Image (cartoon, rainbow, N blue to C red):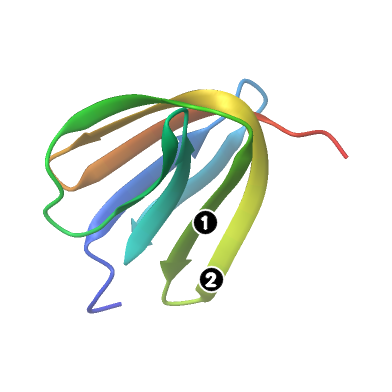
């Protein structure tokens, strides 16, 4: 986990989806998809329907969301989403 330098917290109204360290996160912003890497500038953004993708020591993971918000600050990415129901 030497490269997993970003703390990622993803929550939905129903559960904590993920809480751990990752290498990067890709998010479906309302004005386009964007990536967050180590030492990213602070930001707050709304999210639209799409996939949240991240990579950590266990590999690449993705899941679908309907919408949400993200805050990036001090190498912490906090995401609050509504998950897509299958």
Q: Is residue 64 left or right of residue 41?
A: right
Residue appearing at x 51%, y 76% in the figure: 59
Q: Is residue 86 left or right of residue 13?
A: right
Residue appearing at x 64%, y 36% in the figure: 65
Location of residue 44 by image quarter: top left
The numbered dot on residue 60 is 2
Image quadrant in which the N terminus is located:
bottom left
Q: Residues within 10 Å of mark 2 (few under 14, many from 20)?
A: few
Q: Secondary structure at mark 2?
A: strand
Asked whether residue 22 appears in the rendered view, the answer is: no
Q: Is residue 53 left or right of residue 76?
A: right
How many discs mark residues in the rendered view? 2
Calculate the distance from the C-alpha at mark 2 to the C-alpha at mark 1: 7 Å
Asked whether residue 77 appears in the rendered view, the answer is: yes
Q: Residues within 10 Å of mark 1 (few under 14, many from 20)?
A: some
* N-term-proximal mark, 2 vs 1: 1
Estimate the x, y position of residue 64 in percent, counting from the top left: 68, 44
The numbered dot on residue 22 is none
| In the depicted structure, whether residue 74 falls above or below residue 45 | below
Residue placed furthest toward the right: 86
Location of residue 86 by image quarter: top right
Residue placed furthest toward the front: 31
Q: Which residue is mark 1?
A: 53
| In the depicted structure, whether residue 63 falls above or below residue 13 | below
Estimate the x, y position of residue 40 in percent, counting from the top left: 15, 49
Q: Is residue 52 left or right of residue 6?
A: right
Estimate the x, y position of residue 30 in percent, counting from the top left: 47, 28
Do the CB atoms of the residues marked 2 and 1 lie less than 8 Å apart? yes
| In the depicted structure, whether residue 57 falls above or below residue 31 | below
| In the depicted structure, whether residue 53 falls above or below residue 19 | below
Estimate the x, y position of residue 15 in percent, counting from the top left: 62, 31
């Amino acid at each position: 986990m030497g490269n997993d330098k970003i703390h990622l917290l993803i929550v939905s109204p129903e559960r904590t989806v993920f809480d751990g360290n990752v290498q990067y996160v890709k998010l479906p912003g309302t004005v386009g998809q964007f990536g967050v890497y180590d030492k990213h500038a602070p930001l707050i953004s709304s999210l639209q329907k799409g996939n949240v993708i991240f990579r950590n020591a266990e590999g690449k993971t993705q899941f679908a969301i309907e919408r949400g918000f993200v805050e990036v600050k001090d190498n912490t990415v906090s995401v609050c989403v509504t998950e897509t129901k299958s």
